[in-house]
Image (tube, helix red, strand yellow):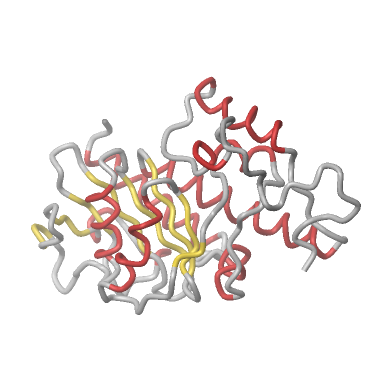
Amino acid sequence: METLTVIKDQICDVCQKMWQLGWVAANDGNVSARLADGRIIATPTGISKSFITPEKLVLLDSQGHVLEAGEGLRPSSEIKMHLRCYEKRPDVQSVIHAHPPGATGFAVAHKAMDMYNMIEDVAVIGAVPLTPYGTPSTQEVPDAIEPYLEEHDVMLLENHGALAVGSDVLTAFYRMESLELWAKITINAVILGGSWDISRENIQKLIDLRSYYQVTGRHPGYRQFNPQDPLLHKNEAPDSEEPTHSN
């Protein structure tokens, strides 16, 4: 596992990239990582991600109590959501919350990204659920995401934004990045006439490739596309005359 210095630098790099990409504005978003000893390093509240530097990060214990913080600095109230991810997923070592415009558009429109239309996203992410609304800074948000953590590494937060978890900071960031590009591509496809899902057979092949490429984390397709499952994916349309997700 990376050293504390390396992890701090990665968090700061990710914060800068999120701000440059327009995924966060003002004081939006938060990033955290779990250290080998169970402690958590997290971004502070009230500071733009463009201004985050290593010395501004806050060190917490596994329960979210502050162990080290610069004067006047404290963790985001959304740390409760991060703690729930770490509690329920021992494999998760980093959590990122942001408001990428394309993906957050789906969340605001109350639409899950449950399409299987992009090869890379089928293999790496799978269908992305829309979690129920939760008031920020309360236990409503962690309670809303908990049922989805078992099978999903990425999710949309209703009227709020997106959440990604990973085995390290960069993996969580890459998942958020993939989510946002996928959202934009799907929106463009719908504008052009419709989004076509990949066939069930080819979806299964893509999911099977995860082990070959050593993709970590969870995937909803392991259950949804089990070869023994007689149910077809509701959006599969290899033989239909109309594309799916056209509105």
Q: 103 or 14: which is nearer to us?
A: 103
Which residue does the image show at 50% across and 44% down from the upper left?
Answer: 220
Which residue does the image show at 37% across and 75% down from the upper left?
Answer: 134
- Residue 42's place in the image compared with 175, above or below, is below
The C terminus lies in quadrant: bottom right
Task: Name the spot of residue 154 as percent of width and height, x first.
Answer: 47, 52
Task: Name the spot of residue 54 as percent of width and height, x first.
Answer: 27, 53
**Image quadrant assignment for residue 146:** bottom left
Q: Residue furthest front?
A: 230
Q: Residue furthest bottom?
A: 135
**Image quadrant assignment for residue 144:** bottom left
- Residue 132's place in the image compared with 42, above or below, is below
Task: Name the spot of residue 147 as percent of width and height, x first.
Answer: 36, 57
Q: 180 or 85: which is nearer to us?
A: 85
Which residue does the image show at 30% across and 63% down from the upper left?
Answer: 81
The N terminus lies in quadrant: top left
Give the left or right position of residue 234, taking residue 13 as reference: right
Which residue does the image show at 49% across and 68% down from the upper left?
Answer: 161
Task: Name the spot of residue 116 as percent of width and height, x first.
Answer: 67, 46
